């Protein structure tokens, strides 16, 4: 297995052997039961739905894997290695080791409708007396040719609440007893937001 489903618990700090302060994000990763295996893909579940909120189709899908309750979240991951996973088995945080590089995917915090200064970090207009264009975007398109706004122009609009993957994060610590994963740096999403953590080859961005 190369990944797990988890939930962001928040940020804290750890100290390495040299006494250096390391900012980390704490992720509750797994345990994730294997719900289905198809070809080179495996479907993992996370948490449990209440019985009265479980659709019959979802419950039947879970019972085929030998699960008593239907998972609240279902995600598909690729199979890595020669081991053949079986439905009903549980994947835990022990698939990760300290020092490994991972990529974390989540949904960023929603910021609503924002202007260009907040959304795209524009510098804004002059701050002198009499000026009324402090935070406005300015000219947005040529008037004669092509007489239209160019596709991809940075303008005000909805900010955040989008799927984002943070690459090159290093695993600092793995707590198998509490199913916790300590990853150096920040990850997308709010506290208690759902995440997927996958192994990634290459160097960490903190090296």
Image (cartoon, rainbow, N blue to C red):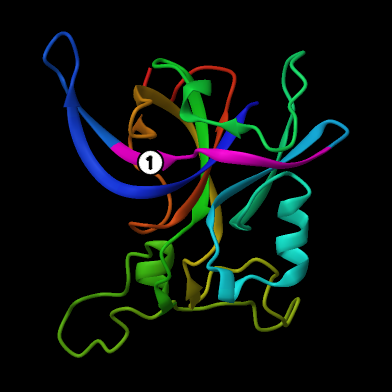
| Magenta span includes 123 | no
Q: Is the stretch drawn in magenta largely helix, strand or loop?
A: strand
Q: Which residues are magenta?
A: 25-37
Picture quarter with the C terminus: top left
Seen at 43% across and 70% down, the residue is 110
The percent coordinates of residue 101 (x first, y second) are 49, 22
Q: Nearer the viewer, residue 39 or 178?
A: 178
Using the rendered view, name the quadrant where residue 127 is placed.
Answer: bottom left
Seen at 50% across and 76% down, the residue is 158
Q: Quick one: which residue is furthest to the top in this view?
A: 18
The percent coordinates of residue 88 (x first, y second) are 68, 38
Q: Quick one: which residue is furthest to the left in this view?
A: 19
Q: Quick one: which residue is furthest to the right in this view?
A: 39
Picture quarter with the N terminus: top right
Residue 104 vertical position relative to residue 119 in the rendered view, above or below: above
Seen at 58% across and 31% down, the residue is 91
């Amino acid at each position: 297995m190369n990944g797990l489903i988890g939930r962001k618990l928040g940020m804290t700090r750890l100290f390495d052997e040299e006494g250096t302060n390391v900012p980390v994000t704490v992720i509750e990763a797994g345990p994730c039961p294997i719900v289905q295996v198809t070809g080179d893909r495996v479907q993992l579940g996370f948490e449990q739905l209440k019985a009265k909120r479980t659709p019959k189709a979802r419950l039947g899908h879970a019972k085929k894997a030998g699960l008593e309750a239907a998972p609240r979240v279902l995600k598909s991951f690729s199979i890595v290695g020669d081991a053949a996973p079986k439905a009903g088995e549980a994947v835990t945080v022990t698939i990760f080791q300290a020092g490994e590089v991972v990529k974390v995917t989540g949904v960023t915090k929603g910021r609503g409708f924002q202007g260009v200064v907040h959304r795209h970090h524009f510098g804004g207009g002059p701050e002198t007396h009499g000026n009324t264009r402090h935070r406005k975007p300015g000219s947005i398109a040529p008037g004669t040719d092509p007489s239209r706004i160019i596709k991809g122009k940075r303008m005000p609009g909805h900010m955040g609440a989008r799927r984002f993957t943070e690459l090159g994060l290093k695993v600092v610590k793995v707590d198998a007893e509490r199913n916790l994963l300590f990853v150096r740096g920040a990850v997308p999403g709010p506290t208690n937001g759902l995440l997927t953590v996958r192994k990634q080859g290459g160097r960490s961005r903190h090296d």
